[in-house]
Amino acid sequence: MNGIINVKKEAGMTSHDVVFRLRRLLREKKIGHGGTLDPDVVGVLPIAVGKATRVLEFMTDAGKVYEGRVTLGFSTDTEDASGSLVEQTPVTRPLEEELVDEVMASFQGEIIQTPPMYSAVKVKGRKLYEYARAGEEVERPQRQVTISEFKRTSPLIYENNLCHFSFKVACSKGTYVRTLAVDLGQKLGYASHMSYLERTASAGLQLEDAFTLAAIDKMLTEDDHSFLLPIEYGVAELAKLMISEQEAKELSFGRRIQLPSSEDSLAVFHQEQLVAIVEKCKEGYKPRKVFL
């Protein structure tokens, strides 16, 4: 079995839990996911099966879109709703919506983030959450990410000295949206956390087209494999180019070819079938991964 599955991950499961369940359902060992989701986060989790696992790195690198909610008034050690209280700053007066929108817009572009302590980033061979659970402090490496869009999608709602509002964010690989919520709160002068999050798009896959594990299980009992998308979906975010039969043959032999493009990487097709992923070099384009 080869292809891409657009899975709708539910709350309470890790991305690895989803892979484990699918290995049992599909009776296929070669399965991987394209972009980790925290257990509390729901939404699109791209899954690659069989030969499609060779395009996983491109699915992981693709941009992502999230919709969620920020709560101003207190922060947690995990930066989301699952953590323990760290700091309280009661919201006792209304905020100006224009100010909130202006501050959110200030995050657009390339920004530097410090990963949360409760994350899987490794420092000296150990994951940050392992240090956090042991009560140990460690210097965290900063990373540069790109925020294409960060906007408020609901009115400001006030209750119990807290302020909530929904948001949408489009961002690059490696972005911690919960950290974005915390940094936004700091700029507004309040302790804050991300109180809800779902991923609505990833690697060209949309939430409205996603399947739950229960739905996949039911479809399998009916011998319905329509949840399995062609491997071509795994390169949806790459620039594409059609090539000739002879050019496809050259790539299958590992040879370089000339192509009318200036892109660093390309997904090349012949008769709608993915032939290879190629990368620019001095002599034209060389094959990076061939699928013939």
Image (cartoon, rainbow, N blue to C red):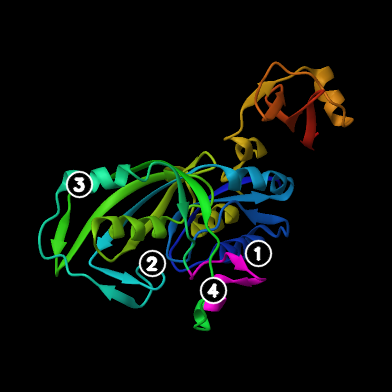
Quarter of the figure that contains the C terminus: top right
Q: Residues within 10 Å of mark 3 (few under 14, many from 20)?
A: few
> What residue sits 68% from the left and 29% below the top?
266
Badge 2 vs badge 3, beta-carbon distance below 8 Å: no
Secondary structure under tag 2 reads loop
Secondary structure under tag 3 reads helix
Q: Which residue is mark 4?
A: 138
Residue range highlighted in magenta: 117-131
Q: Position of residue 75 (x, y in %)?
A: 31, 70
Q: Report if residue 149 is visible in the image.
A: yes
Give the alpha-carbon distance from disc 1 to disc 4, as whole Å: 38 Å
Residue found at the very far right of the displayed protein: 253
Which amino acid type is marked by label 1? Arg
Which amino acid type is marked by label 3? Leu
Give the alpha-carbon distance from disc 4 to disc 2, as whole Å: 17 Å
Q: Which residue is mark 3?
A: 99
Q: Say if the magenta span includes residue 173.
A: no
Give the mark toward the camera: 2 or 3. 3
Left or right: 175 in relation to 122: left
Give the alpha-carbon distance from disc 3 to disc 4, as whole Å: 34 Å
Which amino acid type is marked by label 2? Glu
Residue found at the very far left of the displayed protein: 93
Q: Residues within 10 Å of mark 4 (few under 14, many from 20)?
A: few
Query: In the displayed structure, would residue 210 be above or below residue 159?
Result: above
User: Sequence order check: which comes first, mark 3 or mark 4?
Assistant: 3
Q: Which mark is residue 79?
A: 2
Give the mark toward the camera: 1 or 4. 4
> What residue sits 43% from the left and 58% below the top?
42
Secondary structure under tag 1 reads helix
Q: Which mark is residue 24?
A: 1
> What residue sits 51% from the left and 81% below the top?
133
User: Sequence order check: which comes first, mark 4 or mark 2?
Assistant: 2
